[in-house]
């Protein structure tokens, strides 16, 4: 069985808000995170990538630095991924946030295709 999927063109970005890209991790390997952070580096729209490490692992801090990402950790892992994201929201200042799992390798146009939707004041989530 197959489906035909059609998509409309991405809306034109008018306001160019700042974007923070969060990569959430707990115990994933360096190899997995390297691929995801490489994908984040390839994102064309201007953004800041943050590695949110709930595992508090020194090798993740090194990887973040090597891949041009900022590194955030917290003293505990309360509330799992949601707690990790909420902790980062208090420390970052992007107008928009793209939250990725450790194994989500983004396409280079992910923000080009989504940010324009937020010019609609009635929209909060894509």
Image (cartoon, rainbow, N blue to C red):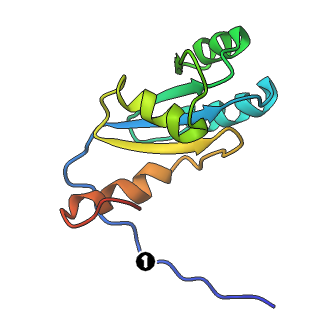
Residue sitting nearer the eye, 58 or 78: 78
Residue 74 x/y as whole percent: 53, 18
Residue 61, by quadrant, is top right
Q: Is residue 44 above or below residue 113?
A: above
Residue sitting nearer the eye, 107 or 21: 21
Looking at the figure, which quarter contains the N terminus? bottom right
Q: Give the side of residue 121 with respect to residue 61, left or right.
A: left
Q: Give the side of residue 21 with respect to residue 46, left or right.
A: right
Q: Check disc 1 and report the residue beneath it.
A: 8
Res 16 visible: yes
Q: Is residue 82 above or below residue 68?
A: below
Residue 36 x/y as whole percent: 67, 36
Q: Secondary structure at mark 1?
A: loop
Q: Residue at x 68, y 17 (%)?
A: 60
Q: Alpha-carbon neighbours of circle 1 within 10 Å: few (<14), some, or many (≥20)?
A: few
Residue 6, by quadrant, is bottom right
Residue 98 x/y as whole percent: 46, 45
Q: Residue at x 77, y 33 (%)?
A: 32
Looking at the figure, which quarter contains the C terminus? bottom left
Q: Give the side of residue 126 with respect to residue 39, left or right.
A: left
Residue sitting nearer the eye, 121 or 55: 55
Residue 101 x/y as whole percent: 64, 43
Q: Give the side of residue 123 with respect to residue 106, left or right.
A: left
């Amino acid at each position: 069985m197959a489906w035909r999927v059609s998509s409309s063109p991405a809306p034109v970005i008018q306001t160019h808000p700042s974007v923070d890209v969060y990569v959430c991790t707990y115990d994933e390997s360096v190899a997995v995170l390297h691929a995801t952070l490489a994908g984040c580096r390839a994102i064309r729209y201007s953004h800041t990538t943050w590695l949110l490490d709930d595992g508090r692992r020194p090798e993740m801090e090194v990887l973040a630095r090597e891949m041009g990402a900022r590194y955030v950790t917290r003293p505990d892992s309360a509330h799992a991924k949601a707690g990790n994201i909420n902790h980062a929201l208090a420390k970052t200042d992007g107008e928009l946030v793209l939250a990725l799992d450790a194994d989500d390798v983004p396409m280079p146009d992910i923000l080009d295709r989504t940010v324009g939707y937020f010019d609609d004041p009635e929209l909060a989530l894509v």
